[in-house]
Amino acid sequence: MTASTLGSAASADRPSRWTDAAARVGTATARGIRAGAGVIRPAAWVLIVAAAVLWAGGESLGWWELTVAAVVLTVILVLCALLLIGRTAYDVTLDLNRTRVVVGERAVGALTLANTGRRAILPSRVVLPVGSGRGVFAVQRLAPGAAVEELFAIPTSRRGVLAVGPVSVVRGDPLGLFERVHHRDEPVDLFVHPRTVLFEGQSLGFLRDLEGLPATDLSRDDVSFHALREYVPGDDLRHVHWRSTARTGDIMVRQYEETRRSHFVIGLSRNPDDYRDPEEFELAISIAGSLGLRALRDSRRVDVRVQGRALPAATGKQFLDSLAGLDSVRPRDGRIEDLAGTVAATLPLASIVVLVCGSTVDAARLRVACARLPFGARVLAISTRVGAAPTLRRIAEASVVTVGDLAQLPAALRKVLS
C-alpha cells in the first residue's frame, strides 16, 4: 500500500473519530442535564421562572423594585442549591427481623447507617419506602467511622406482598426547592400471610389406605390385584402365577387394577363476581390456606388451582407466600364452573377436591361445578358469607358448607364428617 493510500485512509477515518467523540460528548451532556434537572423540585421551577421574568421586566421597564425582587429570588435559589453539596455515601444495611408475618402482626426491622469515609457526612434525610407508603428518618451529622441505627415497625392491616426499600438518602434544603436522592441497598419483600386456623385430625378425615384407591382402569403393574389372564408378549415375567400356569398348562400372569394415591386439590375462585364483597374473598383465602396447611402436615400431595394458573404449594411457606400475593381478577374463563373444568382436565386422578367460593354462587352453579370434577373424587364445596352461621347441605354427591368466620371452620368440618 502506498503512502498516498495510507494518507487517504487516515483522512477518511478522521471524520469518523470526530463523529464518535461528538456523540459521546452529546450523550454525557444530555445525561448531565437530566441529572441536574432531576434535583429541581416543582416549587424551584416556579421560582426560577419568576426570577427570570422579574429580571427581564426590571431591565426592560427600568423598575428597580422588580430587579430587587429578582435579586432576592436568585439569592434564595443559590443558597438552597448550595445545601445540596456534601457526601451521602452511607453504608446502608436493612435488616428485617422477619420477612413473613400474619395479617395484624407488626414487622420489626432495623436500618443501620455507617460512615466508612474519612470525612463527616452532613445531616440528611433517609427515606424507607414500604409498599405505597414510606418512612422518613432524620440523620444528624455523622462523623468518620460512626454509625447510627434506626428501629422501625411496619403495621400490617391487610394481606399482600410489600416491597420494603430501596433505602434512599435525600439531601435537600429546608424550603424543599432542591432535592438530591441517592438510592442505597436493595428492596426486601415482606410477605403478609393470610390468617389461618389449626384443626385436629387428618385432612377432612378423608383417609385412603396405603395401597391407594382402586380405579376401574387395568394395569400390568400395580398393587391392587384384579384377576389372572393369559400371557402376552411384553408382560413382565415377575408377574407370572406359576401355580395356575402348572394347573392349566398355559402361562398365566396377574392382572392389576390401577390405583390412585391420595391427592388433595383446592380450587379457589378469585373472580370478584363470585363474592359479595372483598371480606368474603379474604375469608375464602384464609379457609383455603388452613385446608392446604392441614393437608401438607398430613404429607398429602397438594395442588391449588385458581383461574388462570396454579399456585405453588410444595411447602407451607411457599403456599402461604403464593396466597399473600393473590389478587382478585376477572379472567376470560372466570366462573367457578370453568375452574372446576380446569381441575378435571389437569388433575383427573384427584382423590379429594375442595371448591372455595363466595355467597353469590348459588346452588345451581355449584351443582354444575361439582358435576365437572373428576369422577370418583370426594368433593367438598365451601361458600363464604361473612357473619353467617355455619350450615351444611348436600348438592348431589357433594357436601356444601357455608362458613361465616374462620373460627367456624373446624366445627363445620366436623359436621361434614359426622
Image (tube, helix red, strand yellow):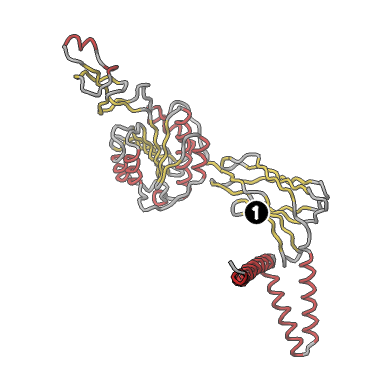
Q: Which residue is mark 1?
A: 134
Q: On the rendered structure, is 98 left or right of 151?
A: left
**Rendered view: 262 above or below 356:** above
Residue lying at the far front in this picture: please name it. 2
Residue type beneath disc 1: Arg
User: In the rendered image of this protein, does residue 245 appear above or below residue 176?
Assistant: above
Residue occupying the point 72% across, 67% down = 177
> Where is residue 233 shown, x and y percent of the image?
22, 23
Count numbered badges in the picture: 1
Residue 172 picture location, percent across and down:
74, 62
Residue beneath the point at 52% across and 44% down: 324
Residue at 77%, 84% (x, y): give it: 66
Considering depth in this image, is 396 or 98 the residue closer to the camera? 98
Q: Quadrant of residue 413?
A: top left
**Residue at the bottom extreme?**
61
Q: Secondary structure at mark 1?
A: strand
Q: Is residue 105 above or below residue 331?
A: above
Quadrant of the image for the C terminus? top left
Q: Classify 10 Å Cα crowding around label 1: few (below 14), some (14-19), many (20 and above).
A: few
Whole-percent x, y for residue 12 in the image:
59, 71
Q: Position of residue 27 (x, y in %)?
A: 63, 67
The N terminus lies in which quarter of the figure? Answer: bottom right
354 or 20, nearer to the observer: 20
Is residue 191 left or right of 214 when viewed as pictured?
right
Residue 212, picture quadrant: top left
Asked if residue 326 lies left or right of residue 245, the reply is right
Q: Nearer the viewer, residue 285 or 51?
A: 51
Q: Quadrant of residue 266?
A: top left
